[in-house]
Amino acid sequence: MTTDPLVIFTPSGKRGHFPVGTPVLTAARQLGVDLDSVCGGRGICSKCQITPSYGEFPKHGVSVAPNALSDWNSVEQRYQDKRGLTPGRRLGCQATIQGDVIIDVPPESQVHRQVIRKAASARAITMDPATRLYFVEVQEPDMDEPTGDLERLSRALREQWQIESLRADLSVLSKLQPTLRKGNWQVTVALYRDHHGGPARLLDIWPGLHEGGLYGLAIDLGSTTIAAHLCDLNDGRVLTSAGVMNPQIRFGEDLMSRVSYAMMNPGGDREMTAAVRTALNGLTQSLTTEAGIDPALIFEAVFVCNPVMHHLLLGIDPVELGQAPFALATSDSMSLPATQLDLTTLNPRAHVYILPCIAGHVGADAAAVALSEEPNKSKDLVLIIDVGTNAEILLGNTSRVLACSSPTGPAFEGAQISSGQRAAPGAIERVEIDPVTKDPRFTIIGCDLWSNDPGFAEASAATGITGICGSGIIEAVAEMRIAGLLDPSGLIGSATQTGTRRSVPQGRTHAYTLWDGTASGGPLITITQGDIRAIQLAKSALYAGARLLMDEMGVDKVDRVVLAGAFGAHISPKHAMVLGMIPDVPLDKVLSAGNAAGTGARIALCNIASRAEIEQTVHQITKVETAIEPRFQEHFVAANAIPHATEPFPELAQIVTLPDVSFNTKGEAEDGSGRRRRRR
Amino acid sequence: MTTDPLVIFTPSGKRGHFPVGTPVLTAARQLGVDLDSVCGGRGICSKCQITPSYGEFPKHGVSVAPNALSDWNSVEQRYQDKRGLTPGRRLGCQATIQGDVIIDVPPESQVHRQVIRKAASARAITMDPATRLYFVEVQEPDMDEPTGDLERLSRALREQWQIESLRADLSVLSKLQPTLRKGNWQVTVALYRDHHGGPARLLDIWPGLHEGGLYGLAIDLGSTTIAAHLCDLNDGRVLTSAGVMNPQIRFGEDLMSRVSYAMMNPGGDREMTAAVRTALNGLTQSLTTEAGIDPALIFEAVFVCNPVMHHLLLGIDPVELGQAPFALATSDSMSLPATQLDLTTLNPRAHVYILPCIAGHVGADAAAVALSEEPNKSKDLVLIIDVGTNAEILLGNTSRVLACSSPTGPAFEGAQISSGQRAAPGAIERVEIDPVTKDPRFTIIGCDLWSNDPGFAEASAATGITGICGSGIIEAVAEMRIAGLLDPSGLIGSATQTGTRRSVPQGRTHAYTLWDGTASGGPLITITQGDIRAIQLAKSALYAGARLLMDEMGVDKVDRVVLAGAFGAHISPKHAMVLGMIPDVPLDKVLSAGNAAGTGARIALCNIASRAEIEQTVHQITKVETAIEPRFQEHFVAANAIPHATEPFPELAQIVTLPDVSFNTKGEAEDGSGRRRRRR
């Protein structure tokens, strides 16, 4: 039996026997314990700090003597004098094992420390980015062994960091020799590792130990908004986030109008490509200015986007995406130098990773949602809806995942709505209508008070009440339906029919007055019959897409609904269900995942293994095409009613009773979906 | 036993039995017979033409019936009508096997046809360039299988051409979709294959079958001259060759003066890099203009060069190459986009391959010589000398190869010689001196007559007699030694000592008059004592380098000497040996390899396997450093005498008896090497 001391690491619980004199770092490495070290055990980086525990530990069956670790040596002492160690801490590379010992690895000493995401439902990201710093000691050149400096650096990385092979661009190769000599053959390198196993790329080199920042961008390139997170690649922290409008909007509001623009205007695709690339450079500039970092320290950018944005970002004419069979130029993930996308504000050797597309209508943004929400690992059947100008819809569990996209249009984002506006201060975002008085109250963005709370007038004076945003319009329409102002076919009742003077005639239809600010020079905010129709079209498309996937899966109900998208975070589940946007489920089974696509981009930025994982997952997702499927049209028509013409929505019925009204004075439905029928 | 027909291919001799109805191309592929096909058996490229033989073939033991192959089918007939087949030929993809048959594959139908090099000693190049055209049929997109066009092209290449993986730059990706549709899902692609097994690069794409040219450059980037061959990558043919002066000469004549320039002038390395890249663009332009081809059809360039040129081409400051330990920034081969070297005249997606360097003083040019001359495959011990401003010297056989470089200086190229000039029309290139009359005769470049032949005056009038080039100066000095005008120490005798008035006093020394054109306004061409000293320095360096390698190898003689370099082709072996430039060997064992470095570049351009081969070989070559080896200095001093102070040169003695003269009037040698002694 071995008489070597027993070493137990916490929190991992890994244990083993090691000869007296073994450095703690060596023991950790041999056991596969996650203990960081940038300098490779030379006592200069201090990343390998550990905390020994002394005394009796019956749970582990060991007793740790005060001399279980070696005394402080000169390296540790010098570090303590110069920089100071937290009391109780030791440097894992210097302290050696002298007896049985229990060693705790604090979170900040773990390489693969986890970054806890804020949303409760979300999984943690394990930090292991493609781009990392490595401190390395390179053998000096020698006349008897005439290899190049790059080859000796490469060998050192292989021996000290298990980096199998290395490539260097000329721009960094030209600074290799002076940097090696300045650092006295000790240098820190930034390497980009290819997750497909190609050679690592030498991105930059610094003399000696360099602990400067290393940053990356996670970018969700949407049709309407470009949202970006600036992340620290060392700890995964989001330094700052920002969003700008996609400047391509001037070429067309939605995807198909941009494809049309490219088809009708020779060179139109190149105009749109240039516009979005310029916007990306500006966005990077403002993010780095805000965070106070040098843009040259951004070494990576990860993109998620829908297929049309994907092609326009890459400089590919999206014309094929506008017609069946909606062929992508390329569907696999892309890894390419940022300069190829004219991203000139980043480090000149920065890399871009673009997640794979699922199909011609289901893009890298849907892949990012799948990476973030992991329907393929869900035991229950989950329906994930990323609400945007196009809705990306995923349905699945561990056995199978389906995906489609559905052209909801921009109504959910407040566009094509008479008083609609972007979600900005002053916009109405929450609405309640008293079922008795039929009077509304609401909140606006930038003010926590309800409009009928004392002090609201003063509190809202700064921004004014300017319009209604996406979540506000959904709540308003749903509340109108609950309050009996709207019938199942989507008709707004007259003042007579509804008993409120807030219903005002407008041509042959009616509008509901939410806010009249005209007396003080403000706007008159109403929900018009046209607004209702726009919301009905959008929600029908959403529901029909989800239903099509359920048909394909052979199910009539799902276990759980996840609303993703920045906008999804603000949708009230009850109101969404009253509208019939989503299939009927228990209300507590409707969850928000926040900006899941953006989170997927962050995961791919912070964890190299997730890239191979999502590439694999995407190949296993079955795409369902909405555009050519006749049943989509059937589902769309049936879903036009509020909440639905034929589906019973029993879960919804348990929490809200929708009034059985009909405002069609002709005694007949305007269309098939509005056919009068009893609702429970 | 099988009753399937027997098929025998010639010239390979490969044979096998195949079912009736098997296309000849299929049989060839199954047997590994080298039969070309660009269209993959669709009867449109005509590359797979074969010639069946009919009748009795006792040697092969078969009798071939007239109906051994199928009748002409409609595809073959259409091809015959449109383009015509050579009588007796069939299309291998259309003709099927019906009975025992003998099938000859003519050279032009072989993919790996060999290009016979002109030099008799040289090996053939097997055509298999890294960049090739592939005709491919791509599956149309389909809504049920939503892969991208690139992924379907990639799959087609895998299935039809065994190309495992594919990458496309954005610039070609953007033309992928329209080209596939224009070609009705049949396209020709140009692919660059990485010899280390990475993904193939999509360089260009054309609709349908494209049979246009595909070209490459083999460039020998020398300190003084840049020489380039423009090669057809289909058949290896050299369309045209050209050379220009290296414009870096204005920064320094030799390598060390250029390194000094970079050290003394901040940014000097970048000036020199810009100069050489500009010259390369100009050279490409003139080569393509001369050959009448579109420069955009040049998809590859292969470079060989010495380490200083290597670094200056890559934009790396060569300062480390100017001081021990002469560390290269990188020694391995390089594969990189041509745009990184600012080579803007080629196809924008062209690739550059640079052969590996052996050491800080022994560059990719020496590697190219090793690739061309293959000392590592030689059974006898071969000494290979690439004569230039720096001499690259290789010594070896199948068991071991050594290499060094030796700083000969530019004297062998006619520089630093009083009447020296480049090898150009009017330059004296061959010299003979009558041992009795001591009068010379010579030839000049551009005229076949000797100077004492009738009609020489008229024939040489066009160019005049302008100076003496490298090979001329070597012959002149050697002939002076043979004729007794020069003693072993290198002293020129006076008119009295030599008995000819052609020896004229010049200060305290003498000069030998080779040609006096002053009467007609021409030059006076003499060989001065200074010229002799310059040649002695150069030849001593050359010999000392070779001798150092022989010491390292533990031998006193070599079996064979190969003189490489454009200049090496013009050196007379006898004169080289009289001078003691090379070790003593039988005269018929001194061979010229022509521009071996340029040939090595051509081999690497035309044959992808040769790249891995030379990278492997270079790792097995032992570099010997001349700069720090004390014995180099000893060998150098001893080699100063003509031919040598201590070596007996018995092989030389068999063909020429050198007069035992001494012109040192002080009765003592000027230096140790000139010490008077008897020569046999």
Image (tube, coloured by chain):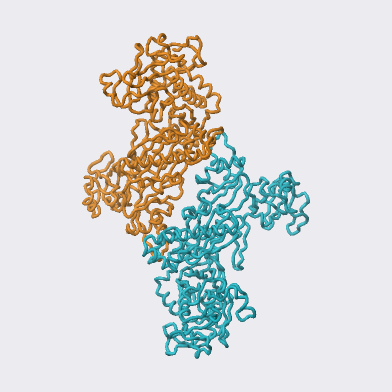
Chain colours: A cyan, B orange
Q: In this view, does B50 lie above or below A536?
A: above
The quadrant in which residue A329 appears is bottom left
Viewer-side residue, A654 vs B677: B677
Rendering coords of residue A446 (x, y %): 60, 72
Query: On the picture, is B201 further left or further right than A7?
Result: left
Q: Is residue A505 above or below residue A76?
A: below
Rendering coords of residue B374 (x, y %): 43, 33
Query: Number of labelled discs?
Result: 0
Q: Which residue is drawn at 35% across and 28% down?
A: B424
Q: Can residue A105 be seen in the rendering of this structure? A: yes
Viewer-side residue, B198 vs B555: B198
The quadrant in which residue A436 appears is bottom right
Q: In this view, does A618 lie above or below A451?
A: above
Q: Residue at x 50, y 75 (%)?
A: A420
Rendering coords of residue B198 (x, y %): 46, 49
Query: On the picture, is B65 further left or further right than A476?
Result: left
Query: On the picture, is A344 further left or further right than A40?
Result: left
Rendering coords of residue B442 (x, y %): 33, 20
Viewer-side residue, B469 vs A66: B469
Q: Can residue B148 be seen in the rendering of this structure? A: no
